[in-house]
Image (cartoon, coloured by chain):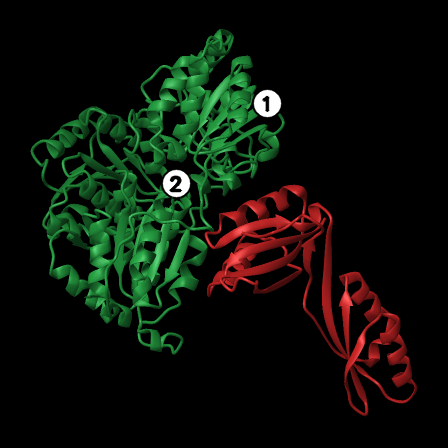
Amino acid sequence: MRHIISILIENESGALSRVAGLFSARGYNIESLTVAPTEDPSLSRMTILTSGSDEVLEQITKQLNKLVDVVKVVDLSEAAHVERELMLIKVRATGKDREEMKRMADIFRGRIIDVTESTYVIELTGASTKLDSFIAGLDAGLILETVRTGVCGIGRGDRILKV
Amino acid sequence: MISGAEIVIRCLQEEKVDCVFGYPGGSVLHIYDALFKQDEVKHILVRHEQAAVHAADAYSRSSQRVGVALVTSGPGVTNTVTGIATAYMDSIPMVVLCGQVPTAYIGQDAFQECDTVGITRPCVKHNFLVKDVKDLAITIKKAFHIAATGRPGPVVVDIPKDITAQMCEFDYPKTIQMRSYNPVVKGHLGQIKKAVQMLQEAKRPIIYTGGGVILSDAADKLTQLARKLDFPVTNTLMGLGGYPATDRQFVGMLGMHGTFEANNAMHYADVILAVGARFDDRVIGNPEHFGSEKRRVIHIDIDPSSISKRVKVDVPIVGNVPDVLDEMLKLLDAGCKTDPEVADWWKQIDEWRGRKSLAYRQSNHIMPQFVVEKLYEVTGGDAFITSDVGQHQMFAAQYYKFDKPRRWINSGGLGTMGVGLPYGMGVLMANPDAQVACVTGEGSIQMCIQEMSTCKQYGLPVKIINLNNGMLGMVRQWQEMFYSKRYSQSYVTSLPDFVKLAEAYGHVGMRIEKPEDVEPALRKAFTEHKDDLVFMDFIIDPGANVFPMVAAGKGLTEMILAEEL
């Protein structure tokens, strides 16, 4: 099962390596990981996309909570939440492909944020599956470079992760 | 204003640390200079940093206090890693203070630099790098707080040399609040009630306890509870002494080398009360085999991640063990029925007991089990027994009956050979008048044998019980049983003359070769040579094996017993 774990952690050097080290030491998966300070600069918020059985997920949450720097842990996917991922994708845009790329970006509500004679950089935001579909919809030979932030997410409504 | 180095020493004084085990070097010279100028904190100069950490670890295990080690940067730190990992696996509260190269040099591959925080991260409860002298005192306060609370563990504080030279006001906080660290103490009352109810309904109960009972000083409360319920009690290797071993209700240690009665009782129990234990692989054997029997499990532990990790638990209780046991006792006193029907179960257990699974074959040579039995008699069952890792460790655990907690000092989780002698040093620093015996083998003892020199310097009269079979006994036992007697690299040839070696270090050496000499030699060591370190080299039967044995991958009830071979 796919799970999105959100972590509030002390914004201290080495905090990221404690989390990453825990996952590798215990053989848990990290499919993506994003981290940045919150509105309170002493805290960072980390989002980890992982997968595993219920037992494994229980251990992941417990082990994360045990880390001294970790303030709070929540499994976002346990309840209603929204998730987004940002992708920047550089594509070849010459000849007839130039028009096609523009059309694809529009269909997926992406924005072209850099233009040269032969390339576009398209910015695309959405659920990870949307980004996957966009890539799948392009001719693979035209993709020059992609970069994705990994998933970040937040609970819906009154579900708030705060100290 | 005082220097960072003086702050370190003042912090230790504030924490009432009376002794530190360590080894000086370039990056900690300021600290050693500050240490020189005072006499509240004693320093024990070891011969290898690994021993400093083991000794601090045993200081902690044998008392209720936090052990402290002090080492220099680079190799000083890397030498401590085995000791830190050993303490981490057994949840021992300890603070390791490490020197580091000056802050401006960090990351430049400076002389004696290593990434201390990175190297130790996977085997500490927490670690710190102090980057500002203003943070030094509070960081050390946090280190002691984190080490000793919750599920205890080792904490490393990495202190760059320039920080120890800078000047700062000293202000040591009395208490500390950390938003990210608030261990639970009280157990959930609803869960405790449910557990007490379940215990009342049990027909075939067992109380299974581990190191958590020792670490949380809950042995008295556990004993009260067990007696009130008249349930059988088994201890893990780490839990020995948590319940008096000479008591009728004690069924012995369980697990890979547990007794026939303990392993059967554990397997066929309908209700297991697990207290401060973690169902590890050496305890329950093959988890599928263990899971084949229907039972209900109550698990008390301060660490939620220990619960339902390897065995599914029906009633989890997260909390400090003595607090939870206290609540249970109150509930039982408040009128709950206290005589569950366990008479039939006891009949069954006594039948298993009748199997006498710890009986061992007689021989013209000295049997190692016999040495431990005699050691028990000669010390009146009241000694601190440290041990290394291997057959001798299991013999000590099986045949020395521990009635009190904190008397059995060994590396259970990591299984570190070489801990025994430095453990003896740590025990003696915390309990200066105690009888301390290190039950070891000729393989393990040589891993930290240089510490005989430290023992001479500080007058630490450890009695070394060397069960010498000229082989790495446990390896040899597995090779005999599972590798068709291909004894690959398990012979130890070219052994030193241990008697002469002990004498060379300024101690007393004895070589004992006949069974009838065992007891007189031990008596002599513990009376005439009470204040000396005595190296007792017992030449034992080289074929002696540890039984019962649950082979790797087998179930708890699939024991190999002594006579079956």
Residue B147 placement (x, y as % from top left): 36, 47
Residue B66 placement (x, y as % from top left): 29, 45
A10 over B394 or under it: above or below: below
In the rendered image, the quadrant that contains the N terminus of chain B is bottom left
Which chain is mark 1 on? B
Q: Residues within 10 Å of mark 1 (few under 14, many from 20)?
A: some
Q: Which chain is green?
A: B
Q: Which chain is red?
A: A
Count of picture labels: 2
Which residue shows up at 22% across the image and 41% down it? B427
First in sequence, mark 1 or 2: give its number: 1
**Left or right position of B319 against A162:** left
**Left or right position of B319 against B451:** right
> Which residue is tagged 1?
B295
Which residue shows up at 40% across the image and 34% down it? B212
Disc ID at residue B412: 2
Q: Nearer the viewer, residue B68 or B549?
A: B68
Please name the amino acid that badge 1 sits on: Arg
B265 over B107 or under it: above or below: above
Which chain is mark 2 on? B
- Asked which secondary structure carries label 1, the reply is loop
Kindly report which numbered mark, 1 or 2, lies closer to the viewer in this rendering: 1
Kindly report the distance in space between the C-alpha atoms of the residues bearing marks 1 and 2: 27 Å
- Asked which secondary structure carries label 2, the reply is loop
Which residue shows up at 54% across the image and 25% down it? B190
Please name the amino acid that badge 2 sits on: Gly
Q: Nearer the viewer, residue A37 or B50?
A: A37
**Left or right position of B323 against A94:** left
